[in-house]
Amino acid sequence: MQRENIPIYQFLSQPFDLFDRHWFLLTSGDFHAQDFNCMTISWGSLGIMWNRPFAQTVVRPHRYTFQFMEKYPTFTLCAFPQEYHQALSLLGSKSGRDGNKIAESSLTPMAATAVAAPAYAEAELVIECQKMYWSDFDPKNFLNPEIERAYVRQDYHRSYFGQIMAITGTSKFAMADN
């Protein structure tokens, strides 16, 4: 997929659509060391925190990707055209502990432009992040009691904030030059 650098303030997104309908592929690790794992996510946010552009994602401690998020300082969020939905479904349902799910998905990991975590050749959007904060969800802080239903196993997510270091994408994600 042909992607171009997108300056942060020229990035166009529909974050609700990206997270909820298209999903992101979260990948943490080091591409050059060939030590990384990924998982499909549909929860997160994009915005400004501490005067920095950031992406926020959450990972449950039992997920294999959790150990990579803990070990490595960077991660990527990659969005794909609709034809890769089946690959994303596979990557969200299988564990990297049990085999090479990335090879099974037929996606092609590649070096990102600004961080050690990989991107994917087929992605139409890559958001590259440097971790800057984490926090564990605390159920006593849930103001809506329905939220607890998402945690039958009491496996509360860890939230990660990543400063956005680079964005590459197809033209549909970039504001036209004025």
Image (tube, grey):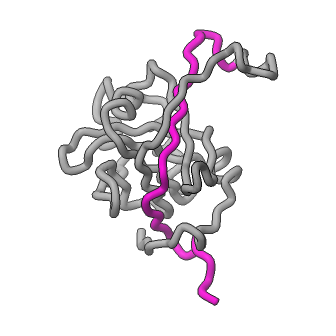
**Residue 124 versus residue 4 in the image, above or below:** above
For the point 62% across and 38% down, the residue is: 43
In the image, residue 11 sits, relative to residue 97, either above or below, namely below
Q: Is residue 123 left or right of residue 150?
A: left
- x, y (%) of residue 61? 46, 21
Picture mark count? 0
Instruction: Tell me which corner region of the image, top left, top right, bottom left or bottom right, holds residue 144.
Output: top right
Q: Where does the image place residue 72, in percent across and percent down from the top left?
A: 32, 38
* Residue 93 within the segment the image draws in magenta: no
Residue at the spot 30% in from the left edge and 43% down from the top edge: 103
- Compared to 66, does 154 lie above or below? above
Q: Classify residue 68 as left or right of residue 34.
A: right
Q: Is residue 67 left or right of residue 40?
A: left
45 or 41, which lies in front?
45
Can residue 101 be seen in the rendering of this structure?
yes
Q: Residue at x 45, y 19 (%)?
A: 62
Q: Report which quarter residue 136 is drawn in.
A: top right
Q: Quadrant of the C terminus?
A: bottom right
Q: Residue furthest top?
A: 153
104 or 113: which is nearer to us?
A: 113
Q: Is residue 90 visible?
A: no
Given residues 178 and 85, the one toward you in this image is: 178
The residue range painted magenta reads 150-178
Q: Quadrant of residue 44?
A: top right
Query: Which residue corresponds to the image point at 52% horizontal and 55% vertical from the top-left?
Result: 79
Magenta highlight on residue 156:
yes
